[in-house]
Image (tube, rainbow, N blue to C red):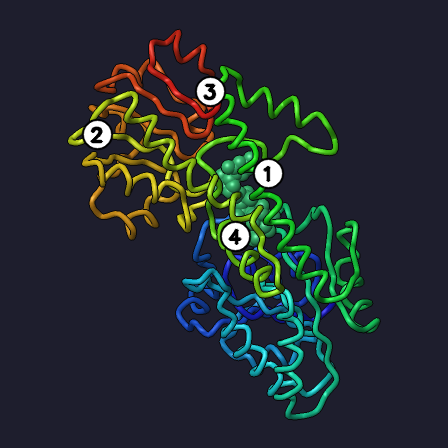
Amino acid sequence: MKNIGIIGSGHVGLVTGACLAELDNKVIIMDDDVKKIGSLRMGVIPFYELGLAEMVHRNTDSGKLSFTTSIKEVVKQAEIIFICVGTPQKPNGEADLTAVEAVSQRVAKAMNNYRVIVEKSTVPVKTGNWIKRTVELNNTNNVDFDVVSNPEFLREGKAIHDFMHPDRIVIGVESERAANIMLRLYNPLKAPTIVTNIETAELIKHASNAFLALKISYINAIANICENVGADVTKVAEGMGCDKRIGREFLDAGIGYGGYCLPKDAAAFIRIAEEAGYDFELLKIVQKINENQRQQIIGKVKNALWNLNNKTIGILGLSFKPDTDDMREAPSIDIIKKLQEEGARIKAYDPKAMENAKAIFEDIEYGKDAYEVAVESDALIIVTEWDEFTNLDLAKIKKLLRQSVIIDGRNIFDPAEMSRLGFIYEGVGR
Ligand code: UGA
């Protein structure tokens, strides 16, 4: 059992803290937000993540997980301190690292014994070095310490699963002492582990997320060709995916990637490359293809309905992907704004994200389910592939719609079946 401190109670911090407690460590999670820590102490999780609430409750009840607003308390009792604070995007695409710097200073000032400071937030390469320098400069009690880069590869909605069953664990270190501490910590997970230097570990994270974005844009580019030649992109993906070197995952064509990670990380990686003297043109095209996918959906709606002015468009799905209530960089935001610019009225439904959506869009009508959204709508757009949309009673939907138009941004329906049911139906790349 190790004593672990987590600084930052966002998505990464809470999941990391809860899972490390589940692995039988004693974990204390710190945040400056007094209200948030107060709620967490009462068992309230500020966002939806599958299985997280249960795990937090279980481990707080057993005394393995606790919360504090005092960084001193964390540094006093935890040998390993994970920095999980936010690294928001600046207007120029760069990551804002002021929170990481401030935390490094505070940790350094409070240290009175050897500590391992782990950078978990997604940060540009060389941040580990900056953390080290900052800690050195503020190391009031002159104690030994190590900085480690240990990037997270957690998908929202599957974060607990990804933590507990990782494809790999990456540990960027400078000393054997810290390497051994980290290896022992993760030993129970029995996962392939890459131990390397800090810069390489930092780059593994960027290169991985950028590659996932590239895979999605690649299949979206193929989807555009498919539409022009009468091919089916879902079959192309299946055919490509059988090749083990390619793999089927992340080859679902659609309205492009969103969320807090892929878009932000691609922008940051372009900036990092630029600073390192490399023009990452490939990744710039990846971004362009992604933006284009959203515009294309609007084109499809217009092809089906002619003018959008005063038409009612039903949006099914608002979160950036299923099983999360996260609206950050969700394709739905762009799509709704573009439809509104064309004069369309919007009705929308999402199983989890409507509260968050209401903070962004006050001027749209929210339905209690997909059927309510379909009533008197001129078209439905599938924006997020929630399971409950795949299982809709389509005959009922058809009766409720004013015009039987479904534009499927996630290819959840079979085009032949939709045509048999009498819909004007358009997927992506089919
Ligand atoms: C992503 C990565 O998958 C994680 O490995 C990484 O740790 C995380 O970012 C992070 O940096 O923290 P996440 O943002 O939760 O995780 O979402 P993904 O499941 O990767 O999906 C991203 C977007 O791509 C979604 O909008 C999704 O709809 C879209 N997508 C995904 C596609 O359009 N097609 C696909 O085939 C797959």
* Residue 323 visible: no
Residue at point 71% right, 46% down? 167
**For mark 4, what is the residue?**
261
Q: CA distance from mark 4 to mark 1?
A: 15 Å
Cβ atoms at labels 4 and 3 below 8 Å apart: no
Q: Could you tell me the amino acid type at mark 2?
A: Leu
Q: Quadrant of residue 215?
A: top right
Mark before the other along the chain sequence, 2 or 3: 3
Cβ atoms at labels 1 and 3 below 8 Å apart: no
Mark before the other along the chain sequence, 2 or 1: 1
**For mark 2, what is the residue?**
308
Q: CA distance from mark 1 to mark 3?
A: 21 Å
**For mark 3, what is the residue?**
228
Is the CB of the residue bearing disc 1 within 8 angstroms of ligand 1? yes
Q: CA distance from mark 4 to mark 2?
A: 32 Å
Mark before the other along the chain sequence, 4 or 2: 4
Residue 258 percent location from the top left of the image: 46, 45
